[in-house]
């Protein structure tokens, strides 16, 4: 099966189809229990599939407006020290088309210098998980 090799295809294209293909290639009686991906798989259909198939997932979240709002909603007292100048917190989130809510684990650290188009004083890394 060709998943876009040799063509200009978005990394997000056919993410669910690829996951289903991988499941179909598993040996008889075996299944995928854990799914880890970068933000290309941060899609409602992939997350729904993981819930439907009792698959634990950890997917880097796109920092879209919904994620930025979720980060802003985390109360100051929820942030905990984590490795040097980093802090970590979590919140519950859902996407427009997900069937269930899931956890967002957010790590932040102070920016070394300001950015012209993003005045926030912190950089963030966010993962979505049902773990």
Image (spheres, helix red, strand yellow):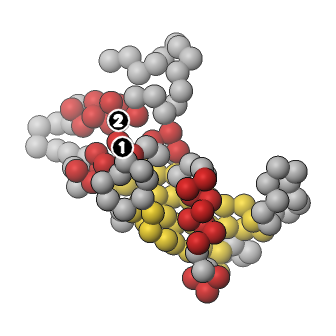
| Residue 46's disc number | 1
Q: CA distance from mark 1 to mark 2?
A: 5 Å
Image: 46 above or below 72: above
Q: Say whether residue 119 is left or right of residue 102.
A: right
| Residue 16's disc number | 2
Q: Earlier in the sequence, mark 1 or mark 2?
A: 2
Q: Quadrant of residue 2?
A: top left
Q: Say whether residue 26 is left or right of residue 83.
A: left
For mark 2, give the secondary structure: helix
- Percent across and percent down for residue 122 are 75, 65
Label 1: how many Cα within 10 Å (few below 14, some 14–19, many 20+): many
Q: Quadrant of residue 99?
A: bottom left
Residue in view at x 53 percent, y 52 percent: 61
**Is residue 35 visible to us here?**
no
* Quadrant location, the N terminus: top left
- Percent across and percent down for residue 31 are 20, 45
| Residue 105's disc number | none
Q: Quadrant of residue 15?
A: top left
Closer to us: 99 or 48:
99
Residue ranking furthest to the bottom: 77
- Marks 1/2 in contact by CB < 8 Å: the verdict is yes
For mark 1, give the secondary structure: helix
Closer to us: 65 or 62:
65
Residue in view at x 56 percent, y 17 percent: 8
Image: 60 above or below 25: below
Q: Say whether residue 47 is left or right of residue 121.
A: left
Residue ranking furthest to the front: 96
């Amino acid at each position: 099966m060709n998943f876009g090799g040799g063509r200009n295809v978005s990394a997000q294209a056919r993410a669910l189809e690829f996951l289903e293909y991988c499941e179909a290639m598993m040996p008889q009686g075996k299944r995928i229990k854990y799914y880890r991906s970068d933000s290309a798989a941060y899609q409602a259909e992939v997350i729904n599939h993981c819930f439907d198939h009792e698959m634990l997932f950890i997917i880097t979240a796109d920092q879209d407006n919904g994620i930025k709002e979720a980060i802003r909603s985390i109360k100051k007292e929820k942030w905990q020290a984590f490795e040097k100048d980093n802090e970590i917190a979590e919140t519950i989130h859902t996407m427009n088309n997900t069937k269930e809510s899931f956890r967002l684990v957010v790590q932040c650290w102070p920016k070394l210098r300001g950015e012209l188009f993003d005045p926030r004083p912190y950089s963030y890394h966010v993962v979505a998980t049902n773990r």
